[in-house]
Amino acid sequence: MNAYSAIAFRLEGDVWWVLSTPGCPPELNPDKADFPELRAGIKAHPATADGLRPPPILLDEAEGGGTQLRLLETQRYDWDVSGTSDVSVTSTLETLPGRQWSIRRGRDLTTGSFAVVNHLGMADFRLTAAGVEHRFALEIVSKKLDYHSEFRKITEDIADFCQQLLLNWDAPTSLNFGIDPEHAARLLLEQFLFLRSHLQPERLGEILESIQRRPNSRLVREARWTPAACAGAQDWLVDPARMARDWRRSSPGARALPAQVLDIRKEDSVDTASNRFIKFALEQFRDLCHEVVEKHSSALTLVHEARELGSALDAALARPFFRQLGKLTRLPLDSPTLQKRDGYREILRAWLLTQAASTLCWDRTEESYHGPTRNVATLYEYWIFLQLHQILDEIPGVSRDEQSPKPSADTARFLETKNGELVINLKRGKKTCALFYIKLSTGMELRLHLYYERTFQMEAAAAGATSYSRQFKPDYTLAIFPKRFDDEAQAAVEGKIAYVHFDAKYRAENMKMIFGELLKDEEADVALDSDKLENKATSTYQRGDLLKMHTYNDAVRQTAGSYVLYPGSDTETRMDKFHEIVPGVGAFVLKPGNDVCRDELKKFLIDVFRHQANQFTQYRHFSDVIHATVREAPSEIGGHQSFRPTADCVLVYLKENVRDLCKQKKLVYTRALKDDEERSPIRIRLGNLSGSVLCPYRGNRTAKTSLPWLAPILSCEMMSRDALCKILRIEGWPLEMMPKSAAAYLLFRLDVTAATETRNVSKLTPKEGYQAVSCRLGELNECQVIEG
């Protein structure tokens, strides 16, 4: 298969169809000598190999005698038909979602361009000139995935997951995955894709040799009337009356002997239910191959492979081994031979793969899993969810939680039973949840809820599992909370839940495309300015995915981390906010067939679970403090000042003659050190009183009540009596009201006062004396309100 940047096909005479990529030489006249000729009617420009990206155009002429072009997704291609204006152009590319298709007509020239985004598979391009139709098969392949290994691995992994469900004998007796007979023809390619990935022609020969070396057999007893002298055994002597006949005497008085006896012969027969199933499966595979050739003749690559596999199956069924087998009357899926013996289990698995292909229930509107082309981005999303599901299944101590109710009415269980049938729910736009729990070695048990496309609604509730700004819908969300809580809502109210979000980025090829390039300070400033200008001009931003992860962490309450999953070639990248594994952001490579990257993701999840189970981590302390701070709305003071219930409150006794003046001047003083200090120790916390509130009170030894106003404390100073009197004189304090009884005082400067209820504060104040005391604002609010 050769690589080109431009290729031209002669339609007739001097009429050519030219397919090229941007950046090719502007003059692409096939009649010029510098346009190299491959063979009669085909000319091309070789592609420049840089070793970094696959070539834009590949030509394959060896399959089925036709011509097939292999093109890249997301790559723009230009085409033109020169030499005539009488040409009709049609293509299946015109109907693809998100297509970039255009066509322009001029005098003696028809031109156009197209690009295929997020779709892989076969497409048809037809040109009709002078009444003659010319068909070109286009196979769209991925830049990011190797089409013939990694993309097939995605489909095989999905089918393998369904196979495990089909082989789960503890499941309901009937299985329904949404079979729709009307779409059988559209699913042919998927069935063949699964079959081809597991049963190559050379592999088929090895499997059949393994079966015939050690075939399943049964002992058959055959009874035939045979001359007594020719009988191979003397079994008839056991019951001569029934097993012998035609008794004769050789002479009068001689002993009677039978002329014929039933000769019982035992031999092995391969005509067993297991072998009949092998024949039945191979016949189905052969019919599938023939149907692909008949109904998808334009898919040249697949047609060639279907013919090759079909011929191998025809040759296999012609073996004498299969000619002696009868028809299958029941499916012996419970046979140990089919499940365990070499050769048999491979055929059973291949058959189950084809059945799984026809029973998957994906979002058909997305063209993600059927038809000549498939939405590979959506298929990659589905594959990641199954990978996360399987990774959780594999982690030691993790079990599926089949008993707990689903988290909410609008959430579908990933696997659920309806009317005795097992149903898979995995569809774009439909919130799906798989429930697990884990028991760690420490004895701690956590619930794990794995979501697909969960929406976090915008709500004002500060302690809920919501967003405070806008709605957000990560591709996957893993909710982690202690098993003692029955549901997420209860755990969220208590602040004991953590969310880890993942987004699938199929379009990303490397870390630079996701998070931008890591540069030094000066270079980073220049690159950031360039990115911002590009974003304003083109609505694209190289670091957009990184900012989106930060957005999840900030906007979605109780989020522990947000990470990108992409099919690249880099290694794991994590950026921890503090010292522990969460909170943070990052990216993980998750590529079909790359078990190393898959193991890195599994190890990360195990570390996260252990971290969440540890009640002494910095993250747990951090989360608990935040939750304790925001779970209750602040108390209102006068409708315009607000304080937390945990805020410090200082209760200060005010004599009746200074109450109005203190409120007016926003100055309050109280004794800090009396001449007889043993009788009046300070009972307030003399730390940073910023953010505290002052509550004045009055009363006698038996009952003390607060005054009907509060005020925020701006500052608190401890000073001598002389220093305090000097300040009060400046503030206009009358001489007769100057303090006289103590050696030192505390002076509080207040903010604007606010009206509040009068409360009985006797239980908060000292029984003897009138010293200032500290409490919490919540304790003050719990005191009895005095009416009037």
Image: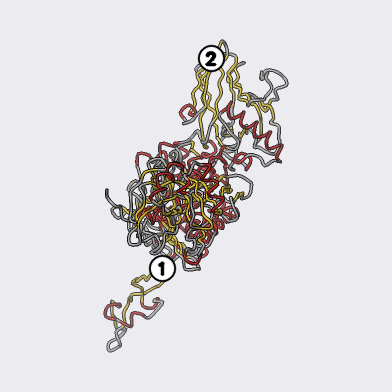
Q: Residue furthest front?
A: 736
Quadrant the N terminus occupies:
top right
Amino acid carrying mark 1 in the image? Arg
Q: Residue furthest top?
A: 107
Q: Is residue 769 visible?
A: yes
Q: x, y (%) of residue 502?
A: 51, 47
Please tell me which residue is depicted at 49% across the width and 23% down the height of the picture.
90
Q: Residue 439's spot in the image, x, y percent?
A: 46, 65
What's the residue type where badge 2 is placed? Answer: Arg
Labelled disc at residue 218:
1
Q: How many marks?
A: 2
Residue toward you, 161 or 108: 161
Q: Secondary structure at mark 1?
A: strand
* Pick the front one: 250 or 45: 45
In the picture of the structure, the residue carrying the numbered disc 2 is 105
Identify which residue, 41 or 600, lies in the foreground.
600
If you read the primary sequence from the N terminus, does the residue marked by circle 2 or circle 1 appear first?
2
